[in-house]
Amino acid sequence: MTQFLTQKRLKKTALKILKFLLMVAITFLGLLLITFLIGRVVPIDPVLAVVGDKASHEVYERARIAMGLNLPLWQQFLIYLSSVLRGDFGTSVLTAKPVFEDILRVFPATMELAFLATLFGIFVGIPLGVISAVKRGGFLDHVSRVVGLLGYSLPIFWLALLALMIFYAKLDLLPGPGRVDVFYDGIVTPVTGFMLIDSILAGEWEIFWNALYHLIMPATLLGYFSMAYISRMTRSFMIEQLRQEYILTARVKGVAEWKVIWGHAFGNCAIPLITVVALSFGALLEGSVLTETIFAWPGLGLYLTNSLLNADMNAVLGSTIVVGSIFLGINIFSDILYKVFDPRAR
Amino acid sequence: MKKLCFLAIVLFLFSFQTAIAKTPADTLVIANSIDDIITLDPAEIFEFSGAEYAGNTYDRLIGYDVDNVSNIYGVVAESWTISPDGKTYVFKIRKGIKFASGNQLTADDVVFSLQRVIKLDKSPAFILSQFGFTPENVAEKISKVDDYTVKVVVNKAYAPTFFLYCMTSTAGSIVDKKDVLAHEKDGDLGYGWLKTAYAGSGPFKLKAWKASESLILDRNDNYWGNKAKLKRVFTRHISESSTQRLLLEKGDVDIARNLGPDDIKGLAGNKNIVIRKKAKGAVWYLGLNQKNKYLKIPQVRQALKYLIDYKGMEATILNGKATIHQAFLPKGFLGALEETPFSLNVAKAKALLKEAGLENGFTVTMDTRNNEPTTSMAIAIQGTFALAGIKLEIIPGEGKQTLTKYRARNHDIYIGRWGPDYMDPHTNADTFARNPDNSDDAKSKPLAWRNAWDIPEMTKKADAAVLERDTAKRAKMYLDLQREHQQVSPFVIMFQDIEILAERANVKGFILGPSFDSNFYWNVTK
């Protein structure tokens, strides 16, 4: 009997996994198809990216055929699909390197920034949101809401330039654009691509500190925006919880106020907050084009935009798959966390 | 209090950290927009930043004086002779040149390099193949006589400077045959490898290239001529003008290469920074598509040339980044026409439009690349066209997008910038004043074709000029050609580019040439 039950459960799980995989596959296929079509519909000639404006007719035609652009659209898509399934994303026109290699190079730069920015968002945004919910209508609440509103509405390129002007140009407190000073560039051989980790692995502590200093400004700026989002969401979740009757009960029971807030109310906010944090982390991983441009930060956002503007379709499709996978991954991850923290979701 | 102390210590550490981090004494640090580099192979390089890289890392047979382009001299070629029939060039190769790899440079390398350009047939190959070389005949046309002599046979008795100037271009760079062939794969002549690697003999050698990030060159200690004074040149890709300016002001870079007019203005009066200028070969023009029923009327073309505020644009929008120029050959080229017959003259334009029966004006579109200064120029032109009742609709687009449309002849007006490919006048005559076949599926598609301008007579004149071996006569032919072109062509040529560079006052000796492959680093000290 028990054996039968386990078998049934196994079968059920297998089905679940299969269903899940099918969903992932369809999502990816749709993602690829749409990006592919958009790439072919835009009024930019991808051959131009390869041969330039001045190439002769023969050179141009040869490149067009080599890129398979003379074939019907559906055939082009099938060819692309089959090479992607074999793990070959093609070669980027702009960098003359395999797209996969490019992404491995640019993604850690974005990841490093996004990770620190999200940490900033969590450690500043959550307390700020909780405090302003508790002291609703008070002075602190107003301040935090204005700060949040600014984070929502200020254009990041402007804020970034302003920050550079003040902290780098005028006060000389923080270093300028780039991942490290020119002096240190190219000394550490990339292993993980994360400057902080690579410099430690290489035992180059000076470079580690330099890279960390270089991270402070862009990470804080990006973090400010994710903080604005996180604190606003935290505030509204908390207000919702603090209105509940169990809070009143707890207070009547004489539970300490900090325990009511952080233990009872916040405990119940934590679960939806996971999604909020995960989504804002995901958004940062796509790469913030403007921040990356101003800080000369060679990340995914800059790579993707550059490729788009130059009709470098292999690079665009490759990056899209990466961004798609990240979002899918983050969604799955937050689903799992939900199940861990919330018994009702199991 | 504890917290305050901690903060003070952290701030102190930060300021200490940045105060010492200025550019290293033996390294030149350049902020430049280098995301146009898509290859490092001189047989394929056709981009500004790529050309500058090759100019500093490879040698060519011949070079020219950056201040007086008509003065050409041998580099890898010690001397050369031209046969009386004008078709055979014999080059004596300089002895004692070593590649960065340590290999000796001989006639084999020269023959291999030039043949390789033809066999690979990448975008710039036409610079050599226009002399009649094909992958089939090149082995016979470009050949080794002995270890230090090379013979080249061209198909027509061209003006000698035409061929020699083409040898000064990036496509004429000499690569290390042994090294390149050692990396050959499936008979690709080392193409797959050299795209991201180096095999030259110039004053600098490649240390590292990270696309759209940085380019690092190290001094080539095997260099045969004057050795570079600095050990390293580090170019960091920074596209934002204001970021470049900040880095320059702080001394974190030594040279900023792409400052906009506002930032240049902002730097004026800064004692630590020197602004330098050099006229470059590119010209700004409007291309008027002759498929458009209004633009094909001669009086309309003429009227539009009087509806540009050349002086106003030069003084405000371009502010030192370009100078008025109205002929297809830029200043500095043999036979360049410096006359500027056109200025803003609304009355005259109106009279011409009346003559064409269009006194009430008409509506026309202009495809405009959405960068600066193109957009501002387009808006200024829109304003002056309106003075004569012409309604100009600006269609903004990304560079590659507007170009795609232009190349398909689907535009009305295109505002563009054209840079010469080599220093001989034929380079621009070939595109602005030649159109051998105006049909839609023509094999060659010069700018005259893109604007559907059918000119069999002028094509013949341009063809004759490139065959004139008497330099004075040839210069006169180009002057006449430009005078005619200036009046009748569907090209409103407006300005010639000026490159502006801002450097720290302690930087000396950066050589700015008339083209990007003649911006040299070897002489820099700091």
Image (cartoon, coloured by chain):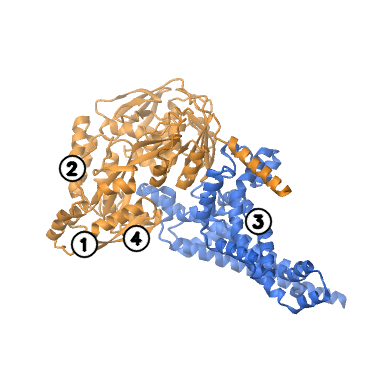
Q: Earlier in the sequence, mark 4 or mark 2?
A: 4
Query: Looking at the picture, how far across and down is residue B141, in whole percent?
Result: 35, 33
Mark 4 crowdedness (10 Å alpha carbons): few <14, some 14-19, many ≥20: some
Q: Amino acid at mark 2?
A: Arg
Is residue A91 visible in the rendered structure shown here?
A: no
Q: CA distance from mark 4 to mark 2?
A: 31 Å
Q: Secondary structure at mark 3?
A: helix
Name which of mark 4 and mark 1 comes first in the sequence. 1
- Determine which residue is flagged by label 4: B395
**CA gap, disc 4 and disc 1:** 19 Å
Q: Which mark is residue A3?
A: none
Q: Which residue is mark 3?
A: A120
Q: Is residue B22 left or right of residue B494?
A: right
**CA gap, disc 2 to disc 1?**
28 Å
* Image location (x, y in percent) of residue B374: 35, 52
The residue that disc 2 covers is: B483
- Give the residue number, with chain letter if any, for mark 1: B389
